[in-house]
């Protein structure tokens, strides 16, 4: 077993009975330790998990459960006596922290921040005992350094003025015309493009761009604009690509990407809505990132078709989004079983540290959903790619609403910085080498 294998191997360290009956959730503000007997009678069931720096936690509920809620306390429940209470320390967001999907579908929760001495309380109001598996995965946080960190620096805005870099309501075709096509024409030996089919409306062509250095070591598959409401996201991605193509060798990671990595990129998947409405769904009102399991829509079929052409060569897939929620500072999404899990956590942590340094951080937590190996997650592009093709995946959610105004220069900078660093770190991990 290599050092890398060790780092990436999930390790189950907590049993399902962990504290389950010792702590009772009282109201919404306090936790009170009760006797096991009282806990048995209680409607609330909880599990307390010590949080550790440098770890992520994956919580799996094999059985149906009520909507899960979480909170964090600073007291060690093992040292508390019956009647002792502990109060929420971190605020409201944990009350309804979150979970997509139906109750019982949920299979993951990650934390990657400085939580030493804190305990995460997971609770539901199910009457039955909840069977739960918790895996702790050690993560080398802070492994990446500022030297490797790519900083695009101050950017221009997307307001479409004389001094803007771009225009937030460019059509899909205009994004290509203003950004990707000039790059391709200037670098014909490096960049090519391919028509991958019409969208569902039949009105628009979908294009994939290939950035292919002469001697590349690996291939990444990147998608943007699957949700056409996320303009600052796919434009941030476009800006990063522009910076990468024109890099000057100063940043090691960016230089590696430019010279050793083939990138297959679909700049905008939802071409219809990017061109006409700037909504999430496509021309038929379908959320394309829920369509991968049965792939009924033209856009989805085209992405799947292209992915299948390269499935044995693709080291990782990165799907770039913008998250419209203001609940968290960061939101990333990846398969915890995948070999890119640790690097995703590490990079996420680095981003959070960066936000703190820049005084942009508002909610000191990092939270991610973890699509596991459940068939239902095949409806997402990342679930499809990982579950069916074994391609490690990552969904980057740029969260401009939280720290930058929409279409602002800062928003563009952060989008380029965050997508860019995830792409760079993914490339530097050379996943193909360690992929099983
Ligand atoms: Zn999205």
Image: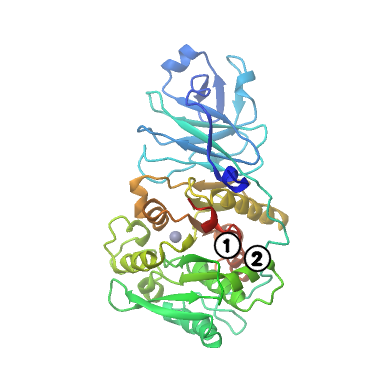
Q: Is mark 2 within 8 Å of ligand 1?
A: no
Residue 412 can be seen in this image: yes
Mark 1 in CB contact with mark 2 (< 8 angstroms): yes
Instruction: Give the image's coloring scheme.
Output: rainbow
Give me the residue at 68% from left, 71% from top.
154
> What is the quadrant of residue 52 in the picture?
top right
218, above or below 12, in the image: below
> What is the quadrant of residue 280 in the picture?
bottom left
How crowded pointer 1 is (Cα within 10 Å; few <14, some 14-19, many 20+) is rated as many
How crowded pointer 2 is (Cα within 10 Å; few <14, some 14-19, many 20+) is rated as many
Label whose residue precedes the other's in the sequence (1 or 2): 2
Badge 2 is on which residue? 253
Determine the secondary structure under disc 1. helix
Query: At which x and y percent is residue 230?
Result: 47, 65
53, above or below 40, in the image: below
Query: At which x and y percent is residue 360?
Result: 66, 56
Badge 1 is on which residue? 427
Give me the residue at 46% from left, 43% from top.
98
Give me the residue at 41% from left, 66% from top.
310
Report the image quarter containing ligand 1: bottom left
Residue 318 can be seen in this image: no
């Amino acid at each position: 077993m290599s050092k890398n294998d060790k780092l990436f191997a999930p390790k189950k360290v907590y049993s399902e009975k962990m504290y389950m009956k010792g702590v009772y959730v009282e109201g919404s503000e306090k936790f009170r330790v009760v006797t096991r007997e009282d806990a048995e009678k209680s409607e609330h069931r909880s599990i307390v998990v010590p949080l550790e720096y440098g770890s992520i936690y994956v919580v799996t509920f094999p059985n149906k459960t009520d909507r899960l809620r979480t909170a964090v306390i600073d007291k060690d429940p093992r040292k508390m006596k019956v009647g002792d209470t502990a109060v929420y320390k971190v605020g409201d967001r944990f009350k309804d922290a979150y979970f997509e999907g139906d109750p019982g579908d949920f299979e993951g929760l990650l934390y990657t921040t400085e939580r030493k001495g804190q305990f995460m309380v997971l609770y539901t109001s199910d009457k039955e005992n909840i069977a739960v598996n918790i895996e702790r995965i050690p993560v080398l946080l802070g492994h990446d350094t500022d030297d490797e960190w790519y900083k695009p620096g101050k950017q221009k805005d997307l307001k479409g003025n004389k001094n803007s870099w771009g225009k937030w309501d460019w059509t899909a075709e205009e994004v290509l015309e203003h950004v990707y096509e000039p790059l391709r024409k200037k670098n014909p030996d490096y960049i090519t493009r391919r028509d991958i089919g019409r969208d569902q409306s039949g009105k628009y062509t979908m294009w994939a761009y290939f950035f292919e250095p002469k001697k590349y070591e690996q291939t990444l598959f990147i998608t943007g604009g699957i949700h056409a409401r996320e303009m600052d996201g796919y434009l941030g991605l476009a800006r990063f690509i522009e910076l990468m193509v024109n890099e000057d060798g100063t940043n090691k990671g960016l230089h590696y990407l430019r010279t050793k990595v083939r990138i297959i990129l679909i700049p905008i998947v939802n071409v219809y809505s990017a061109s006409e409405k700037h909504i999430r769904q496509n021309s038929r009102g379908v959320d394309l990132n829920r369509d991968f399991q049965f792939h009924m829509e033209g856009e989805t079929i085209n992405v799947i078709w292209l992915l299948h052409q390269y499935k044995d060569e693709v080291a990782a897939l990165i799907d770039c989004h913008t998250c419209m929620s203001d609940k968290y500072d960061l939101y990333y999404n990846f398969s915890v079983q995948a070999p890119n899990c640790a690097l995703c956590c590490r990079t996420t942590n680095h981003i959070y540290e960066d936000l703190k340094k820049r005084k942009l951080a508002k909610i000191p937590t990092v939270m991610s959903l973890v699509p596991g190996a459940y068939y239902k997650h095949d409806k997402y592009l990342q679930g499809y790619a990982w579950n069916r093709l074994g391609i490690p995946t990552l969904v980057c959610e740029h969260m401009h609403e939280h720290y930058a105004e929409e279409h602002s220069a800062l928003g563009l900078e952060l989008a380029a910085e965050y997508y860019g660093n995830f792409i760079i770190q993914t490339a530097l991990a050379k996943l193909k080498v360690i992929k099983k």
